[in-house]
Amino acid sequence: MTSTQPLTVGVVGAGGIAHPHLAAWRYLGVPVVVHSDEGAAAAARQYGARSVAHLDELLGQCDVVDVCTPTFTHHDIVLSAAAAGRHVICEKPLSHTRHEAVEMIEACAAAGVQLHPGHVVRYFPEYVAAKTAVDAGRIGAPAVLRLTRRGARPERSWFAESAKSGGILIDQMIHDFDFARWIAGDVTQVYASVVGSAPGPTIGIAVLTHSSGALTHLVGGWGHPEEKFRTSFSIAGAHGLLRHSSTEAESLSWSIPGASPARGELIPLGPRGRSPFVAELGEFLASCSGGPTPRITAADSLAALAIASAASRSAETGLPVRLEEGVL
Amino acid sequence: MKKLRVGIASFAHVHASSYAAILRDRADVELVATDPDALTAPPDEVRGASLATELGVRLVPSYDAMFSEGLDAVVVCTENSRHRDVVEQAAEAGVHVLCEKPLATRLDDAEAMLRACAQANVILMVAYPVRFHPGFCAMREAIQRGDLGRILAITGTNNGQAPLASRRWFLDPELAGGGALMDHTVHVADLLDNLLNVSPEQVYAQVNRVIHADEVSVETGGLLAMTYANGTVATIDCSWSAPSSYPSWGGLTLAVEGDLGSARLDAFAENVEVFDDRSGGLRWDAVGVNLDALMLDEFLSCVRSGRSAQPDGDVGYRTLQLVLAAYESASSGHPVMMTGP
């Protein structure tokens, strides 16, 4: 593979996360083939791609596989892609279980292909700005972080099945577990709770203790269908404070009396005019063509999964869970 | 209407000035203050006679002198660990008490204060002014009506600047009973107690000293997570995490999640933004109700009528119990079961 020839991307899946990915690939001018159990032809039409009927066909026609299927199917597809010698982009979480994620990482390493986990939060401009400010020493050593992430409950039923998605701690809060670790370093102890169930909201709450001494408080929520997607962070450091709230940092807002509330936004596209998916997938594709290592690696994703898995154990037992040495 | 004779016992607490100014301006109050421990404070802190003059408040030299004036009520603003002696003296003199928070730094002190006031049949109220916030009252009514459904989770924050600039006793473990965890947990704990009407079963806490690590010996950061018998979970961020350039002293927020809806209180959101180059940039000038004034009004109204006053010493005791259990958890790394009072 040389960097002079444009790579072809094979998108597997045509559901929720596939849409912003397909839109980003089209924006980047990348040739795309799509395969999915359902909806591939329509998605291909919508985004100017080709659809194929079988995974094997897709693997035969692309250089990079972009896995956008439900979490519980990631493992088998990634192993097939690795066996076919294709680089892999895999939506987060890599898997809902640690041992599957480890197998995926090992299979890709053994096949000599790259594996890029889709933790798109690291590409949202506000989270990038926070990381840049912390790294520049503008608030000093991180001390106490508060991270929140709220939105509508995902429509597809597999999200609610812990055996398929891992539940809110692993599916949704892994974004902020990863961000917390990006900002404040490795985590030594986790305490978490999950309350509520459909049709009401499900709320996950976690307290992380980092090896640096920093503490992180996280809240994740899946709520009513019309609940607006929103995130916030507050990062207190030794001599400063960083804060952002997506609801307070919007450049456009509406008030239309009598209009019914808009449906909740399941997949945020970030501040207007700047798609974090374009930044993310562009960085991954460049790496597949010999470019620099992306800001998020499979090892980072595994570390975030270790935190999320520990949080799940804590929520089940009501006890704090220490992360094993060497896991991270 | 007969004037109430009200005393302020010590200017140690930062809120003493606010209470003194409010009471001084009330037509139904005759105010006297004493600050005998002013000499133990660092010389650069404005206390004692100079603060009394600044505030226009009459100062007497000792607690004995103050209580000998036949007070109706006293506001206790000593250092935390010195509350007990003054409260016991007030009870003995038959004087109603409004005591700064936390009620005490040790449970045996708190028990003694509750006992003394009960035996003397005087009010023991604890200074939790956010309890009087109209937004909080509306939130409590909505919850009681069932508007939010079953309460799943409450996340509270009480963050502020570390007390480095003045009243440095807040950083002395002996006088303050700890750091941010002791200072800032109890306000939110009181609101949770009032909203849920039950004490938590279990508390997990972690603390650190990343902020001002070189300047103080107490914790400056802390997180608590409580679980309740009915499955509700609640958390408190009690950190002194507002930098010195923050536009105000800090703030308090409370987010309540029910299965039917949610509500969020930002108790000090009502302000005007002032950009002032000479005082370091953005400042938030509060325009909301004066919570101290509402609290003092309720206290004095109870003193006149003999009604029992809320927040009372019992909730002061329960919130102290939570703080002490949180210290135990932070020290062991394990959740601590709460035992009943």
Image (cartoon, rainbow, N blue to C red):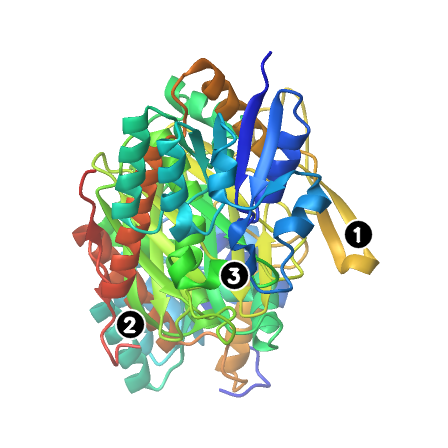
Q: Is residue A274 above or below residue B34?
A: below
The secondary element bearing badge 3 is classed as: helix
Front residue (pair B71, B152): B71
Q: Alpha-carbon neighbours of circle 1 within 10 Å: few (<14), some, or many (≥20)?
A: few
Percent x, y for residue B84?
A: 36, 45
Earlier residue among tags 3 and 1: 3
* Residue B93 placement (x, y as % from top left): 40, 31
Question: Is residue A153 among what the camera can see?
Answer: no
> What element does badge 2 sit on?
helix
The residue positioned 63% from the left and 46% from the top of the image is: A248
> Same chain for marks 3 and 2?
no
Q: Mark 2 is on which residue type? A: Ser
Q: Could you say where residue A125 lies in the image, as x and y percent from the top left?
A: 61, 63
Identified by mark 1, the residue type is Phe
CA separation in Å, label 3 and label 1: 37 Å
Decide: marks 3, 2 in contact (CB < 8 A)? Answer: no
- Does residue B63 appear left or right of residue B293 in this picture? left
Residue B217 vertical position relative to residue B62 in the rendered view, above or below: below
**In this picture, residue B191 sits left or right of residue A50:** left
Q: Which residue is mark 3?
A: B40
Q: Which mark is residue A80?
A: 2
